[in-house]
Amino acid sequence: MNHDTIAIIGGGNLGKSIAQGLLKQHNPSQMYVTRTKVALLDDLKAIGVHTTSDNILAVQQSKILIFALKPYRIESVLKELAPYITENHLVISVISDFSIEQLKSCVSDTVQIVRAMPNTAAAIGESLTCLATKNASAANMSKAKLIFDSLGETIEIDESLMDAATVLGACGIAYVLRFIRAMIQGGIEIGFDAKTATKIASQTVKGASELLLQNGNHPEEEIDKVTTPKGCTIAGLNEMEHQGFSSSLIKGIKTSIETIQKD
Ligand SMILES: NC(=O)C1=CN([C@@H]2O[C@H](COP(=O)(O)OP(=O)(O)OC[C@H]3O[C@@H](n4cnc5c(N)ncnc54)[C@H](OP(=O)(O)O)[C@@H]3O)[C@@H](O)[C@H]2O)C=CC1
Ligand SMILES: O=C(O)[C@@H]1CCC=N1
């Protein structure tokens, strides 16, 4: 694991998920997490993480800087921090819709930058993180990969695909959770209590994912194994498709990316 001190600037939903995931292997005393409402980081403080609203201190004490701020905040925060960010730092941004070019314009030319797009499953080591860089050395890219490998799986992509990675991987968690919620609601209608329906739906989704991840099959190949001729699965699936199931997901994915790319 990485022994460099890591600062997470912006300990919100994603920043905190990353911290929680990293802490399974990373020494809490070698981690800084910042936000303005610092009391909301007391759970991390209790286990030895340095929590502060002082971004300059966190930058000065750390080698690896992970920026997890809202896109509209990054410019002003980076400009304030620019004099303290040196070529000895590695800057990693998980911020959507803020390019490496935009990041570079806020800091010195010599600063190496990696863009990363993880998701909130980082908290339990099950993220899929896409990584891209334009100027990071192989050694720094390996460091970034090591960090995100410890939070799940990583894929290196061209930065031009970062919006697509944001939608499929990061927003994707929400789409899948909404699917699970619908399964639960259906499960309750047909007789299960909410707790049992949640267990069945969640484990079934996990099993379906594992079939693809472990066997490398196309989803339809696995679906064919379930659909008995004239049976209840194909009847239900076809009704879902008549109601626009796949189409609504594809349209939603396209709407999400259009929302990122509209400005
Ligand atoms: N949530 C997700 O699943 C994903 C999010 N992202 C990207 O990650 C970024 C963060 O998203 P998310 O975690 O959801 O947003 P949050 O609003 O939950 O987190 C942002 C955090 O930044 C803190 N913050 C605001 N100003 C400062 C400051 N000056 N210094 C330090 N911290 C500050 C806020 O805390 P306070 O109010 O206390 O200052 C807040 O906790 C976004 O750019 C988003 O696009 C990417 C992939 C997935
Ligand atoms: O919804 C959003 O804009 C952010 C980016 C990816 C996940 N959450």
Image: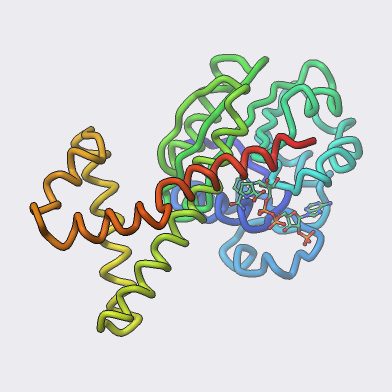
Instruction: Choose between 137 and 241: the one closer to the eye.
Output: 241
Q: Is residue 54 left or right of residue 26?
A: right
Q: Residue 154 location in percent, x, y?
A: 45, 33
Does 45 appear above or below 31? below
Q: Residue at x 28, y 78 (%)?
A: 196
Rendering colour mode: rainbow
Residue 211: quadrant of the picture: top left
Q: Residue 3 location in percent, x, y?
A: 54, 37
Q: Residue at x 85, y 24 (%)?
A: 105
Does 81 appear above or below 57? above
Residue 50: quadrant of the picture: bottom right
Q: Is residue 72 left or right of residue 50?
A: right
Name the quadrant of the N terminus: top left
Name the quadrant of the C terminus: top right
Q: Residue at x 32, y 80 (%)?
A: 188
Q: Residue 66 location in percent, x, y?
A: 66, 40
Does 137 appear above or below 190? above
Q: Residue at x 30, y 75 (%)?
A: 187
Q: Residue 158 location in percent, x, y?
A: 57, 20
Residue 165: quadrant of the picture: top right
Q: Is residue 108 left or right of residue 191?
A: right
